[in-house]
Every structure is written in C-alpha cells, then in structure tokens.
Image (cartoon, rainbow, N blue to C red):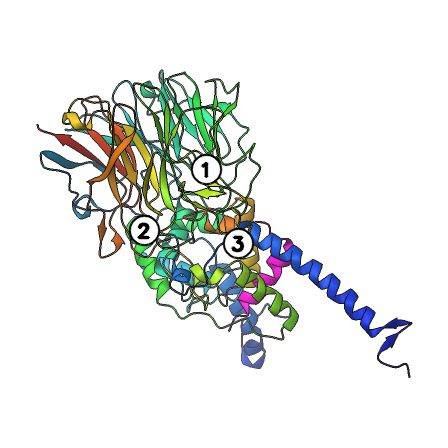
C-alpha cells in the first residue's frame, strides 16, 4: 500500500501548496467578480441590511386619497391630473399638451390634453423599456430608453394615432442599472444625454459611462460634456449664463447621513469631472476606490441636497407668476431616499446670487411623507406658460399644479 | 381496448390516477370563460395548485408570496411587460381591483416546503456563498420569505428560479427597480444554477 503522504513522487506539502495556490487564485477571482458589481461597500449592520428599494402598488392612488401637499403662504396646490401610473418626466408641447413619461412600472408615455374643464389623459406609447427620458422641440417628442433615442414627429397633431418613431440615436450602452435617461436640448441646439454608472460604485469605462454627452438633433457629433457623474436624472440650463446645471445621485450604502447628493454646475464643458467614483459630495474620498485620490482634483458641487436624497428633475424658474425671489431660482424634486432609514421627500428651491452662487436651499413643496413612509414622491418639475409649476409623482401616480396669487 | 372503457371495479381505480392528472392538465391553462373573480381564482389554482403549490416543476409555487409581489407580477403580465402566453391571457382583462383581490388570496396560501429528495452538499454550499455574496437576503429577507414587492424565493421551483435569473440578466424581465438586474449581473450559468439549487432547497 502506497503511503498516504506521497502521491507518485509528489510530497503532501507540494500538493497542499499547489491546492492552496489554486484555491487562492479562484478565491481572488471570485472576490473580484463579486465586488465589482453588487456587494461593494455593503455594510454588515443589521438595520442597514433591511433596506430595500421602495415600491408603491402598481395602481395609481385615487384622487381623493392623494397626499395633501403644502407650499409657502400665497401659493395654491391642486391636483392637475390623477390616475397616471408611474408619472415621471414632464414636458410641454407648443399647443399646451403636457407629456408625461414613466419608468419601470408603466413603460408608457402619456399626453395630458384639454383645459381645466375637460382634461384627459391619452397613452401615446406603451410597452417601452424604461422610457424615462423625454423632450419636446419643434413639434417632435423625443423619447429615450437605456438603449436608444427616438422621435415622434408632429406629435400634438397626432395624439390619437402617433406616428411610427424615427430612431435618432441607438449607440447607448443599454444597461438597466442607472441606464434610464433624462434628456434635454441645450441653448446650443444640442441634445444632452446622460449615461449613468452601471452599478452602485465601480470604475466603469469612462468613455462609455458616468458622464453627460451631447449630440446634434440628428444624432451626430457626440461629445462628452461632463465626467465623473454617477447618475443624473435632471438638468437644466441657466437662463442667462446658459451653463448646464444638473442633479447627481451619489452612491448607496456608505452611511445613514453620507454621502450628500449634489447640485452641480458645468463651467467648462468637456473638461469638468465631478468625482465619481473617487470623490463623493466634494467632501470625502470613497472608502474603497478613493485611496490615492483627492477631492481637490474634482469640481465641487454647487450645493449639497441631503443624504441619499435622490434629487431628480430640476428647472430654473423662468416664469413671472411667482414672487420675485423665485425668479432665476432652481426648483428641485427630491424623490427621497430608499437607502436611509429616515425618509424625506419634497420639492426644494435653490436660490442663486448674481454670480450664480447658491445662497440657500430650502423645502418648497412638502407633505409627501407620513410616519416615515411615502405617500408620494416627486420626480420632475415643469414651468408652465402661465408661470405655474407642475410636479410629477411616480409613487401616487399624479401630477400637481402649484400656482400663486390668483 | 385497454384503458378506454368506463372506469369500473379494480381496473377503474387504477386508471383513475392518470385520468385525474389528465383532467388537471386539461384544466390548467388560460380559462377563457373566467369572468368572475371566483373563476379567475379557480384558474390560478388549476395550475398553481389549490394550496399554491404546483405539481408541475415548470410552474412556480405561489403560496406564501407577499401580496405586493403577486400584484406586480399580475400587473406586468396584464401589461405584456412580462411574457408568458398563459399568464398574459389570464391577466389580460384583470381590473386593478381584481389584481388586488387575487394577490390578497394568493398571499394567504401557505408557503411551499423546501424541495425534497437527496441534495448535494457541495452545491448547497456554492449556492449559499453566492446568495450571501449577492446579498439576496437584504431584500428577500434572511430566510428568503420575501416582503413587499420582493417575492418569496425559499422553496420556489428550481427551474423557475433559474429562468428568472436568466431573464433578469438578459433584460427580458423587468423589476420595479434595477435591483435584480444588478444582483445577477456577471454570474455564469453554473453559478446561477447553484443559486437556484440552493434557494429551492432552503430550509
């Protein structure tokens, strides 16, 4: 009988070390793969370990059960339209149509038409995959999914029988995580398109991900405008300086009160880097990826919008209905955190001075949270022709109207 | 003609088992005449079992699922956002109120027991390691019983779990968030199979 500690001339020790080595390599590969996507930075804390994304039932809240929202004295809040499942992005057509996008739940694009007396909702597209991004210009509605951007021409004349969409751009990566879009034409006539990081925190290919780019209206001439952007779902252009401002959602799982989500200002298109994944909130380097990096090397946020606040749609107030102090200020929908035990959500307002420095951010429209649970969650804001502000709510499936003094 | 006669005596008793199975198979499928809520619930039970535990390994157990999880899947089937010919037909005409009522009924059914039979300890360990690494228990609860929109996955049919993972990977199935697409991202077929193996047998 062959001794157990030798195998055809191999010593036990050499077999063991070979096995150990192979095991170490396999383990290292496993580790890398796991951490690359999902596990990274997850706390072991049992309270944190219970947090999960928040979902409302796939049924809109009836009009009489919608949250009662509060705005400052002199403002009036009313339900513009209820029964719009998963109401997300808002855009206005030339003829008064309000277009509403949706995301995971509904997969539809809606059009709200008619005046106050006989308003109605039409579904103009359905079965779309995460069609969060919409934009309207020169009679056409643009719709962006994680995969492509399409265009529906002469849409307001054909709401009952929308035309077959034309493909504008189909070279998007198509990832589901942070792949959904917010799109908007800039004052330069170019369409601005973000591509989020396909993860919570990782080092994705910077030429493809974590950026905002712009293209010509026909999809040509792509150029990167901003880098180090984790996931923006809202931006607008300063009405006077024409600079791009955007909200950015920072990483999950760091801490209850960190990081703080950002409002950012692009002063140098094509050159500015906003720090993801190395610097968060302009304040701290990432505990895993940030070693050897410095927040000084990245553009600082123009304002901090709260921990895990999920700031989404934002618009400069360009109307004249609201009091003077709101003109040129930015309304920001804070969708509210899932990755934080204490919930909050509102539409906030950021005031700017003459040099475009943010002087103050404060809540404007509140009442979305009760007993630490969501009754509604604001997604986008839209300044109407009369100066009123529309606010979409994907949790309750509604659009609200905020007006002043009449 | 063996087996074609009317059941009678001892031979009839022997023949009744396959006949019952045949009847169940015939009844399982989109019930075109399911108009009332009771009919629709009966149609669920025909395939998924009276107690929410299916007899066919290709059909998922539904017992013990959280109400919101059921409501969402019925909704996705109704809207054609999740593809399955039988389920798309069954859910096509359901009202929002019916989604609510059916989901309520399903959520009261008992959860299925873990898959029986012999199991390979090595695969269970592999599956457990993947489940821990991907933090499945964060959303689906540490005992994988599910909550809110996140389904019970403990004791679910293995083949169904595996198909779900692959559908999420391929983007063929959507969730209410991107979480599932992220959770299964980068796992290879063998790893997904081990994960399904483990969850189906979880106890």
x%, y% of residue A368? 23, 47
Can you say whether A141 is above or below A3 in the image? above
**How far separated are the C-alphas under marks 3 and 1?**
45 Å
x%, y% of residue A177? 48, 43
Q: Which residues are magenta?
A: B186-203
**How far separated are the C-alphas under marks 2 and 3?**
21 Å
Indicate which label's residue lies in the foreground, 3 or 1. 1
Mark linked to residue A57: 2
Name the residue tied to disc 1. Answer: A296
Instruction: Chain letter for mark 1, please.
Output: A
- Residue A22 in the figure: left or right of residue A49: right
Provide the secondary structure element on which disc 1 rests: helix
Instruction: Chain letter for mark 2, please.
Output: A
The quadrant of the image that shows the C terminus of chain A is top left
Task: Find residue B51 and report its image quarter.
Answer: bottom left
Q: Is residue B57 visible?
A: no
Q: Which of A58 and A228 lies nearest the eye of the viewer? A: A228
Query: Which residue does the image show at 16% across and 28% down from the upper left?
Result: A116
Q: Which of A311 and B194 lies nearest the eye of the viewer? A: A311
């Amino acid at each position: 009988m062959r001794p157990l500690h030798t195998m055809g001339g191999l010593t036990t020790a050499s077999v063991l070390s070979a096995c150990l080595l192979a095991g170490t390599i396999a383990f290292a590969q496993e580790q890398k793969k796991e951490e690359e996507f999902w596990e990274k930075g997850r706390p072991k804390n049992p309270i944190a370990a219970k947090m999960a994304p928040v979902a409302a039932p796939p049924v809109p809240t009836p009009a009489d059960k919608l949250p009662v929202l509060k705005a400052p004295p002199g403002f009036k809040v009313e339900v513009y339209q209820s029964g719009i499942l998963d109401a997300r992005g808002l855009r206005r057509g030339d003829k008064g149509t309000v277009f509403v996008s949706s995301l995971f739940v509904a997969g539809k694009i809606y059009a709200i038409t008619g005046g106050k007396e006989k308003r109605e909702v039409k579904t103009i597209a359905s079965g779309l995959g995460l069609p969060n991004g919409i934009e309207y210009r020169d009679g056409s509605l643009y719709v962006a999914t994680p995969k492509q951007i399409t265009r529906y021409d002469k849409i307001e004349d054909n709401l009952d029988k929308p035309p077959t969409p034309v493909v504008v751009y189909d070279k998007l990566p198509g990832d589901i995580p942070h792949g959904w879009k917010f799109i908007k034409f800039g004052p330069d006539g170019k369409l601005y398109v973000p591509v989020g990081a396909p993860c919570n925190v990782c080092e994705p290919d910077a030429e493809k991900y974590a950026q905002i780019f712009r293209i010509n209206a026909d999809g040509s001439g792509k150029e990167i405008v901003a880098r180090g952007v984790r996931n923006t779902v809202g931006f607008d252009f300063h009405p006077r300086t024409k600079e791009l401002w955007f909200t950015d959602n920072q990483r999950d799982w760091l801490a209850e009160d960190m990081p703080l989500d950002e409002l950012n200002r692009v002063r140098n298109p094509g050159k500015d880097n906003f720090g993801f994944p190395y610097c968060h909130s302009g304040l701290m380097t990432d505990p895993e990826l940030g070693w050897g990096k410095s927040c000084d090397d990245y553009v600082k946020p123009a304002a901090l919008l709260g921990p895990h606040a999920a700031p989404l749609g934002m618009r400069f107030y360009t109307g004249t209905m609201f009091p003077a102090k709101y003109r040129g200020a930015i309304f920001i929908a804070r969708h509210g955190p899932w990755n934080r035990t204490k919930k909050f959500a509102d539409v906030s307002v950021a005031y700017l001075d003459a040099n475009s420095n943010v002087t103050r951010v404060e809540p404007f429209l509140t009442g979305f949270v009760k007993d630490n649970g969501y009754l509604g969650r604001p997604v986008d804001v839209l300044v109407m022709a009369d100066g009123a502000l529309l606010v979409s709510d994907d949790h309750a499936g509604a659009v609200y109207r905020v007006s002043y003094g009449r | 003609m063996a087996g074609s006669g009317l059941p009678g005596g001892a031979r009839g008793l022997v023949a009744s088992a396959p006949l019952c199975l045949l009847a169940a198979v015939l009844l399982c499928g989109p019930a075109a005449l399911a108009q009332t809520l009771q009919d629709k619930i009966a149609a669920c039970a025909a395939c998924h079992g009276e107690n929410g535990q299916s007899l066919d390994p290709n059909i998922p157990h539904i017992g013990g699922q959280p109400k919101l999880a059921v409501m969402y899947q019925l909704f996705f089937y109704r809207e054609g956002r999740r593809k399955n010919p039988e389920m798309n037909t069954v859910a096509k005409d359901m009202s929002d109120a019916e989604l609510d009522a059916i989901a309520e009924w399903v959520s009261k059914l008992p959860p299925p027991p873990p898959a029986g039979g012999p199991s390979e300890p090595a695969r269970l360990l592999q599956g457990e390691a993947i489940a821990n690494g991907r933090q499945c228990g964060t959303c689906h609860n540490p005992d994988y019983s599910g909550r809110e929109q996140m389904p019970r996955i403990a004791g679910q049919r293995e083949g169904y779990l595996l198909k779900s993972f692959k559908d999420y990977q391929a983007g063929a199935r959507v969730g209410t968030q991107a979480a599932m697409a992220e959770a299964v991202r980068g796992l290879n077929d063998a790893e997904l199979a081990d994960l399904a193996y483990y969850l189906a047998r979880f106890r």
